[in-house]
Structures are given as C-alpha cells and as structure tokens.
Amino acid sequence: MGLTEQAFTLAESMLAEPLPRRWSHSLGVAKRAATLRPILGRDAGLLEAAAVLHDVGYSPSIATTGFHPLDGARFLRDQESFDERVVRLVAHHSCALLEAEERGLRDELAGEFAMEQPALVDALIFCDMTTTPYGGHTTPADRLDEIVSRYGSDTIVGRFIQRAAPEIHAAANRVEGRLAAAGAPQPI
C-alpha cells in the first residue's frame, strides 16, 4: 500500500465513525491537495497524505493533550511510524505554533517536530483554510470567520486564529501565485 492509500485508510479508521464532520473536512482538504499537483511535483502524494491526516489528533482514541496537531503527530510518529515529512506537516499545520503558544505547548511542539519545507507548509495551510468543516470549498476569509464564530473570539482557538490570519492569507496568496505562474487552473 502506498503512502497516500495508507494515510486515507488510517484517517478513515480514526475519524469516520467517532467524528464524521472531521472526516468530511479531512476528505475535502485532501481533495483540495490533489488540485495542487501541478505545483508540487514529487511531493504531491506527500501533501495529500498529510492533508487527509492533518486532523487525526482529534480522534478520541489518541487525544491526550487536547492539542490535535501535537497529539496527531505523536501518534503518527510513535504508533504508526509514519513518514517523517508527513508527521512534520501534521504537527505544524495551519500555523500550529501560534496555537501551541496559546496553550503553553510551543516548546514541546517546536522541540519535537522540525518545520517542513515552506512551500508544503503553505500548501497545507491553503488546503485546510479553503475547505469548510463539511468538506466544501470556501475562501480563507470566510473560513477564518467561521472558525472565530464557532469557537468564539476570546477562546484559545479564537485568539490563535485571529493572530494567524495574516500568515494564513499570505500562505494562500503564495500558493495562488505559484499556481498562476505554473499556468495551472486556480482551485475553485
């Protein structure tokens, strides 16, 4: 079984039954990742695997710290011996260091998991932040508004996502610029 197939199988086993909305979102993020193949080259499958696994840390069977990027990355590394680059992308997806800081876990996250290549980090941010909780397409601005609305502006997640907004928009712009430069169709 290849990396992407392994990732889909594992993510489904961890999310589909206990967290069907997270599973729908993860499928949508992976579908979005597949649209970036023209700019990712040999890393396309790697990004798709990270995309479908990015929220696996929400699974009740492995959630220990309550911080899903850290819980997911630890699980993928320690229990599944998953590809190191996928693990790093899961650990740092969507500006996770800023949320880790809000939770007092920044040193743990940064100490355990190195950052992946910036172009892949941007691509995963783009995929996550242009996918609704139900797996549909959205804009980064609407996704950020939805997250703040769902969690509240004064919660850990609300504060973090507002701080991360400039970087999320910048990452999305960089990905769209790379797609345009490659003459690739812009994802809808």
Image (cartoon, grey):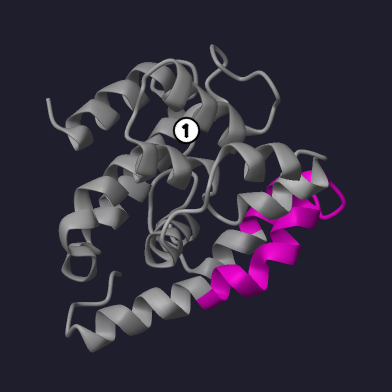
Q: Residue furthest top?
A: 61
Q: Quadrant of residue 7?
A: top left
Drawn side of residue 93 relative to residue 181, left or right: right
What's the residue type where badge 1 is placed? Arg
SS at mark 1 in the image: helix
* Residue drawn at point x = 25 percent, y = 88 percent: 181
- Whether the magenta-drawn stretch holds residue 151 is answered as yes
- Residue at 52% x, 50% y is 93
* Residue at point 54%, 48% (across, down): 92
Circle 1 crowding by C-alpha within 10 Å: few under 14, some 14–19, many from 20: some
Can you identify the residue that label 1 sits on? Answer: 21
Q: Is residue 141 visible?
A: no
Mostly what secondary structure, the magenta segment? helix
Residue 130 in picture, x, y percent from top left: 44, 61
> The N terminus is located in which quarter?
top left
Relative to 42, residue 54 above or below? above
- Magenta-highlighted residues: 146-170
Q: Quadrant of residue 13?
A: top left
Furthest residue to the left? 1
Residue drawn at the location 25% of the way across and 23% of the way down: 9
- Residue 51 drawn above or below residue 172: above
Residue 148: x and y in percent read 72, 55
Q: Is residue 132 left or right of residue 135?
A: right
Is 66 left or right of 54, judged from the image as shown? right
Residue 12 x/y as whole percent: 33, 23
Drawn side of residue 168 relative to residue 138, left or right: right
Farthest right residue in view: 154
Q: 168 or 90, which lies in front?
A: 90
Identify the image quadrant of the C terminus: bottom left
State yes or no: residue 155 in magenta: yes
